[in-house]
């Protein structure tokens, strides 16, 4: 199968940091179909050789493998790289792209749009106008697809006018992570979880996506975005869907996406009360992480000195259906938190009738670790080792562990590697459908509106902590607390 | 609290192999109440010093600790040891025992009866006749308590005439193992298991008690006993009760024993069909274990050359109640099997609707390991690591692990240490009530009767294998198979 993969934004950060390295990994793993072309499109004046050299040079900055063998492999891989100069804001610049694609008729054309958000609509429309939307073409769209519900709808409308839904691959790279795909496998490949996976047994579910990093060089972009748009609207809600969805009728893309959509539609809408009590936004101030002093958010380059952008969000969602009514789903994400840690914690209810002496605050937990390690922990209570002559049995916490890297070996297929291969092969399972995205935007929109009109602004928290104390107060009001890494 | 612990059979194997070492461990752990006496009773003519010397000498054979410190500790411990010469078949020999106990009025007197089974009734009656059954006295009875239902009933009747039930501590040393006690803690200290612990979710439960050892020096005894009496009637059925019982109303001895009794009473009685199809007995022939040639059972010393005694039993039990109806409980135990391994495997039903590609024969399992290591394994299916371009998600087996020794440190409280301390302190939880034992005898009695009249005899199996193939055929008829150690 021959393919042409066109990277719009071919000289950009995402291309050389993530996409080309992911394609190289697939090439090394022997899973990238032979006879393909990877065509970078950018505004710089380059030819194929200079593009290859540019990519290779930048690539060496991110790739640790300095062996001559790796360099030789890259050389062979680089033969797939090509370059077309184009200013995507100019209609006439689409002609050379079309020409390049017409030099041969590849079985599949993948248009990967990783450009400035403002260019999404013109690019999509120009591609269609240039006839680059035929049957064999797929378009991959990188987030952010819009800035709010109206802008998202406008993009979606344009995409829909130009491409049919099954041609559109909306990336949420979290869905490409093996640990996230595994959520589906665990829930629906094991009979064990289904009887437990419901309001009768589960007290609450916590989704944590914590970063140690600050905004790095993306200050100007991030200041326009914030944690809600950057993490909650997409990644966190996708995790929530994978956790909460009903068993799909089969493993096909639409069956899974239908069920995820139902979850999003079941999310309780915000009310003035819940906007006040069930969400906390924060912004980091200067602090220390790993023994190093780091600046506050407002001192980051590209950030407005009086910025009101949130770098932290904690919220409580509730799903109004038979399975989940009354079970809080807590989402917490932020930059400059105490450590890099993405995990899902399923907190089970305590035993209804306790005949033993239990340690305070210990409940059964299933911990699904996504980052930095990928693993499972099952926290139980067992008989404590008692040497004394106690006549009551005391319980002590124990845990069962599973480390996926140990099980399957390190160097698993990365998120972008997986997703790019899926796009080339036309597998939509791990991509987000337009109605899902729209529903997610619809749910977060009231938060954006509320914050726009809220004079208080985000609460400060010192870099290196777990966010503003209001976040702990929020969950404490429910009688729960955040599960933090030991 | 002062105590006198009288070991009837004080020079016997059990005393120096198990009981005195267990008491010494408790002494070292600081849990043996100070001011106690341990009084060995035997037919040899010894005084306290020579008894101490005898125990110390034999003790060194079993105790690995050769440090001078250990010798000093033993010296101090040995001051608790005393000796009374008595032939327990002679009424007049009980007078010196009484005298010894009357030299001081200990708060608690524990009479530990580990004598030849034939002596049980006379010993119990003589103790009562000598007035050694007052309020502060407890009697500990070692198995085998009888040879069949009538002989068991006779012993129980004698015990009941002489002691009240709350004075009687019937030992099943399996109940003293931390891993077995932990069964109660796991089931009733965790909310997680209860929704899963039922016929809707569980396909079958397997109880394995496999020994590598043969009959060793106990050939003559074992040849009169067999695997059914030695392991099934007591240990295996106690494990079955702990697995199958309903949640008790509290953790007191009688609440737990009431629930275990209900399980025994719910065991489906044997029919001519099930006697034929749901039980397999075997007897080992010569073979190799761990690279060493070992003799067949009939060539063991003390064993009759044409012995029909079973050294292996596999059977299928069923519990006729709402929770378990239709779920097979398979028990398998034997000597000279492929490896020493005691474990319980809970096999869950497969997912009712499979949307992924599952490896054949893989189901969710909870493995409770009792011996040689004490641990938990939870076997699940996860997404297989797929590098290829498969459009179906394949599952692969993974397991979560917990090693109790790692969690709590090695050198946990041993079974006899726990049970002796419990007897001294009057805690009945881990001892078996007479009605439980009688019910268990009643359930195995038809098997004994059937075998007595069955000309076929036990099926041969080579030492070092997993028993006769008829055992695998038995479980295969249900569509299941034995879970064997990987």
Image: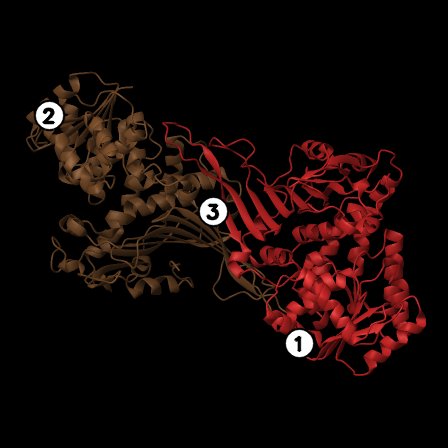
Chain colours: A red, B brown
The residue that appears at 51% across and 66% down in the rendered structure is B359
For the N terminus of chain A, give its image quadrant: bottom right
- Residue B256 figure quarter: top left
Q: Nearer the viewer, residue A460 or A395?
A: A460
Q: Which of pointers 3 and 1 indicates the residue nearer the eye?
A: 1
Disc 1 residue crowd, few under 14, some 14–19, many 20+, Cα 10 Å:
few
* Kind of element beneath mark 2: helix
The vertical placement of A13 against B148, above or below, is below
Q: Are marks 3 and 1 in contact (CB under 8 Å)?
A: no
SS for tag 1?
Answer: helix
Task: Give the numbered dot on residue A76.
Answer: 1
**Quick check: B235 above or below B69?**
below
Q: Earlier in the sequence, mark 3 or mark 2?
A: 2
Q: Are marks 2 and 1 on the same chain?
A: no
Residue under pointer 2: B94
Residue A476 x/y as whole percent: 68, 32
Give the residue number, with chain letter if any, for mark 3. Answer: B323
**Is A192 displayed left or right of B234 in the figure?**
right
- Seen in the picture, residue A183 relative to A25 is either above or below; the reply is above
- Residue beneath the point at 60% across and 68% down: B387
Look at the numbered disc 3 and give the secondary structure of its residue: loop
Marks 2 and 1 sit apart, C-alpha to C-alpha, by 95 Å
| Chain of the residue displaying label 2 | B
- Which one is closest to the eye, mark 2 or mark 1? 1
Discs 3, 2: same chain? yes
How far is mark 3 from mark 1, CA to CA? 64 Å
> Is residue B417 visible in this depiction of the protein?
yes
């Amino acid at each position: 199968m021959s393919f042409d993969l066109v990277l719009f934004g071919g000289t950009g950060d995402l291309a050389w940091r993530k996409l080309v390295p992911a394609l190289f990994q697939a090439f090394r793993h022997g899973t990238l179909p032979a006879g393909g072309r990877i065509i970078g499109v950018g505004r710089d004046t380059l030819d194929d050789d200079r593009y290859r050299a540019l990519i290779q040079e930048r690539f060496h900055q991110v790739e640790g493998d300095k062996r001559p063998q790796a360099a030789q492999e890259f050389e062979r891989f680089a033969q797939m790289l090509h370059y077309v100069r184009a200013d995507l804001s100019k209609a006439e610049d689409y002609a050379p792209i079309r020409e390049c694609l017409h030099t041969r008729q590849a079985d599949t054309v993948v248009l990967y749009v990783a450009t400035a958000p403002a260019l999404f609509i013109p690019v999509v429309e120009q591609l269609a106008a240039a006839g680059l939307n035929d049957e064999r073409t797929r378009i991959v769209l990188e987030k952010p697809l819009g800035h709010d519900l109206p802008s998202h709808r406008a993009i979606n409308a344009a995409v829909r006018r130009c491409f049919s839904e099954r041609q559109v691959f909306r990336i949420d790279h979290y869905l490409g992570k093996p640990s996230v795909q595994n959520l589906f496998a665990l829930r629906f490949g094991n009979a064990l979880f289904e009887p437990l996976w419901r309001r009768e047994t589960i007290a609450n579910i916590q989704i944590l996506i914590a970063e140690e990093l600050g905004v790095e060089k993306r200050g100007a972009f991030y200041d326009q975005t914030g944690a809600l748009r950057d993490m909650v609207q997409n990644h966190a809600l996708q995790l929530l869907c994978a956790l909460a969805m009903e068993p799909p009728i089969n493993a096909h893309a639409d069956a899974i996406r239908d069920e995820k959509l139902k979850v999003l539609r079941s999310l309780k809408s915000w009310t003035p009360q819940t906007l006040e009590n069930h969400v906390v936004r924060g912004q980091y101030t200067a602090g220390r992480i790993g023994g190093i002093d780091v600046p506050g958010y407002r001192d980051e380059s590209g950030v407005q000195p009086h910025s009101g952008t949130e770098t932290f969000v904690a919220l409580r969602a509730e799903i109004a259906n038979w399975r989940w009514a009354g079970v809080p789903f807590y989402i917490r994400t932020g930059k400059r938190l105490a450590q890099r840690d993405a995990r899902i914690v399923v907190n089970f209810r305590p035993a209804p009738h306790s005949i033993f002496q239990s340690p305070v605050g210990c409940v059964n937990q299933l911990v699904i670790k996504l980052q930095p390690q990928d693993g499972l922990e099952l926290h139980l209570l067992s008989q404590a080792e008692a040497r004394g002559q106690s006549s009551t049995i005391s319980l002590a916490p124990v845990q069962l562990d599973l480390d996926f890297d140990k099980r399957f070996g390190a160097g698993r297929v990365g998120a972008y590697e997986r997703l790019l291969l899926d796009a080339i092969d036309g597998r939509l399972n791990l991509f987000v459908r337009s109605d899902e995205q729209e529903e997610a935007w619809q749910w977060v929109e009231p938060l954006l509106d509320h914050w726009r009109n809220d004079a208080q602004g985000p609460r400060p928290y010192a870099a290196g902590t777990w966010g503003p104390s209001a976040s702990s107060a929020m969950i404490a009001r429910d009688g729960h607390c955040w599960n933090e890494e030991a």
